[in-house]
Structures are given as C-alpha cells and as structure tokens.
Image: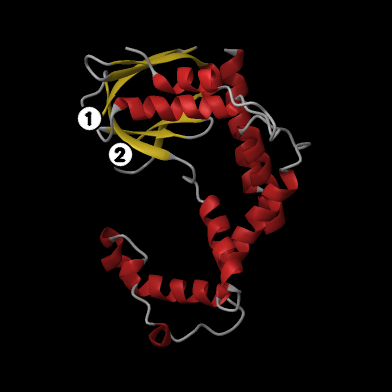
Amino acid sequence: MPNINYRAACVESVTHIFNTIYTESQYAKWMACCKLASKGRSLADSSYEAEKKTILDFLQMQKPADSPALNPNSLNIQVEDYIAPKYLKKLKGKLLHRIVEAHANVKNLPLIDAKLSYIRAWQNLPDYGVTLFVVKFMDSKKEELLGITHHRIMKMDINTGDHIKTWRYNTMKAWNVNWEVKHMMIQFEEGSIVFSCLSADCKVVHEFIGGYIFLSTRSKDASQTLNEELFHKLTGGWS
C-alpha cells in the first residue's frame, strides 16, 4: 500500500508541476528533469544542460517564422510527401501552411545545419528510438505492438500506439525463445510474459533485447575490450 500511495503522490506532483508551467524555459527544465529521471539519472548529470537546450531548440522550430510565410506555389510542395494518406483529406489545407512555415524557419540555414536541425527534431519525437514488432501475447487473441528501446520494453495498442504496459530491463530476470513453437518468454520480477512475433522471426526480438543489455554493460572508454563471448551469449539465444 505505501508503494501505491507513493505512485499516486508522484502523479499528483507531476500534474501540479505541468499545470503551473508558464514559460518555455520552465517547460524545458521540467521535461529535461523527467527525461533524466526516466533514465535513472539525477539533475547533477552532465547531460542536463544539453537535454534542456535540445528541448528549447525543438520548441523554437515549432514557432511561426518571423518573416512572412513563403508562397507555397513557389516551393512546389506536395503535401502527400509529408503526411500519411489517412490524415491527408482532413488536414491538407492546414498542413500546407504549417509546412511552409517550417520551411521558412530553416530556409536560410546551410545544408549541414538544416540536416542537423532535422535530426535533432527527429530525436525529440516521443517514439524516437523505439523499434516496433507486431506480436500476439498468449493471454490475448488480438494483435498488439511490442516496442523495444535501449532501456525498456512496452506493450502498445496497435491502432493508437498508446502505451499499455512498460517493463524495464533492470527488472528482467531471464529471456529465451522456444524454437519449436516460435514463442518468446521474458521473466520479470513481477511476472512473465509469453508472445509470438508476427512481423519478424522471434530471434530478432531476442537479439534486440540482448544487444541493448550488452550495450548497457559497456563503458564510455574507447579502449574497453569487446567481450565477444558475452555478446553472443546475450544475443544468440539457445535451442
């Protein structure tokens, strides 16, 4: 019960924080805090200032350009190249204006700087770094998404992308593949999950998880010796 009350208090505190944010600077500070906290790091971490600056740069890119919007006809912009077909009919007119504004924000940048701005914006998207697999869990009849990142696994709704359940690697005890039936089992401290992968061989999922766990054991020392035996043990699976 104390754990549940603690979680509820955390949710209430975070809600209060975001309800009292008035400036971009405040938003960037709190978002940077949340990002570091999700990685198990504190505000003393050296990446805090970089995280804050990246968020501010991303917000700046979303502002309308100071100069007048460019003539869409002069740019020969095809909205179809930027948006999925299912959203095109409803949002085409509005999107063209937004695309032109975004273009005006970067039109004077050198090519390399424009590419770097694009990469930074991409890295700030909510699902950046998430590899998705279509799976079917043993306790469910419907298809769902399994998202894998460098520090967690997520069960997601296949239609909306909403996160249903999250498991972190630091709570994982074991993972293996049943090669006969092509099922993967992952054991966590709170229980186990079993699923089949419909969009790839289940060994690929095993390799992703093992690879990320192997990378988490590496230091930033460039001279560190590669432990090939551990790498193959974590990613290879067994029959």
Classify mark 2: helix, strand or loop.
Answer: loop
Residue 77 in sight from this viewpoint: yes
Check the picture and name the quadrant holding the N terminus. top right
Q: Could you say where residue 86 lies in the image, as x and y percent from the top left?
A: 26, 59
**Marks 2 & 1, CB-CB < 8 Å contact:** yes
Q: Could you say where residue 224 lies in the image, as x and y percent from the top left?
A: 67, 28
Instruction: Residue at 41%, 27% (x, y): give it.
Output: 207
Specify whether 162 is left or right of 10: left
The front one of 78 and 18 is: 78
Q: Is 57 drawn above or below residue 202 in the view shown? A: below
Instruction: Residue at 74%, 48% (x, y): give it.
Output: 49
> For residue 44, which quarter of the picture?
top right
Amino acid carrying mark 2 in the image: Ile
Q: Which residue is mark 1?
A: 142
Q: Is 92 drawn above or below residue 199 in the view shown? A: below
Specify whether 137 is left or right of 233: left
Classify mark 1: helix, strand or loop.
Answer: loop
Circle 2 packing at 10 Å, graded few (<14), some (14-19), many (20+), is some
Q: Is 145 drawn above or below residue 4 in the view shown? A: below
Amino acid carrying mark 1 in the image: Lys
Residue 21 in sight from this viewpoint: no
Measure the C-alpha gap from mark 2 to mark 1: 9 Å
Which circle marks residue 158 in the picture? 2
Instruction: Residue at 55%, 77% (x, y): give it.
Output: 107
